[in-house]
Structure formats: C-alpha cells, structure tokens
Amino acid sequence: MREDEKTSFAERQKTAAASKAALLAKFKPKPTVADPLFDQRAGIKAEEEKARRQERAEAKALTAQAVAEKQAAALQAEADAVAAAEAEVRAGRKERKVLSKAESKAKRDAKYAARQARR
C-alpha cells in the first residue's frame, strides 16, 4: 500500500460494506411509476385494433373484387369465343346457301336454254 493512503482496517471494512450495500440496492425492486394514460390505454388499444380490422376487411374486399372481376373477364372471353364460333358457322351456312342458289340457277338456266334449243 502507498504511504499517502494510510487506511485502517475499519475504514476498509466500512468501504467494503458500503459497496456491497450499493450492489444489493441494484437488485431491490424500484417503486413503480403510475402510467398517466393507464385509463385511456384500453380505449387506444381498442381503436387501434378496430383500425387494423378495418384495413384487413378493406384488403379482403379488394381481393374478392379482383377475383370477381377476373372471373367475369374469363366468362366474357368464353362468351366471345362462343359467339365468334357461332358467327363462323352462320357465315359458312350463308356461303353454302349462296353457292347452292347459284348452282340451282345455273341448272334452271341450262334447262331453259335446252328447251329453247329444242324449239
């Protein structure tokens, strides 16, 4: 030990006891501080939960709307395809009808020409 720090045994014991008491004081429970907004916390939490639920409901509604629009678009595309196929069938019928009319007119004209030739 240094000369300038001449401490007695009693002083060292007192210092050790004080430091031990300070260490033990760290582990003692501290007095609680009352939350000034304690009464309002339940209301605030309820509002936040309500807002979260609202956001989830809106997101769910948007998703459902997107799915419905997708299904409607698929149904419309299918209906358009069916209509196009029916239009193609109708066009084929009209073309065959025109050709058969032309053939029957040609036959009639041939018969008329044959009758005229026989006279």
Image (cartoon, grey):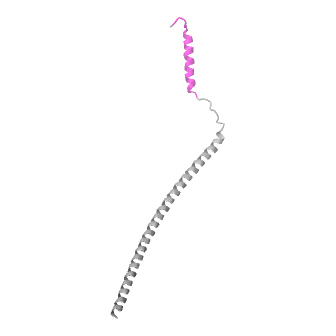
Q: Residue at x 39, y 84 (%)?
A: 105
Residue 31, relative to residue 37: is it above or below? above
Q: Nearer the viewer, residue 102 or 89?
A: 102
x and y, in percent, of residue 102 in the image: 39, 81
Q: Nearer the viewer, residue 12 or 80?
A: 80
Span shown in magenta = 2-28
x and y, in percent, of residue 76 in the image: 48, 64
Residue 57, relative to residue 116: is it above or below? above
Q: Residue at x 37, y 89 (%)?
A: 112
The quarter of the displayed image where residue 117 is located: bottom left
Q: Residue at x 57, y 48 (%)?
A: 52
x and y, in percent, of residue 41 in the image: 63, 41
x and y, in percent, of residue 11 in the image: 57, 11
Q: Nearer the viewer, residue 14 or 102?
A: 102
Left or right: where does residue 103 sit relative to residue 64?
left
Helix, strand or loop for the magenta stretch, by majority? helix
Q: Is residue 4 magenta?
A: yes
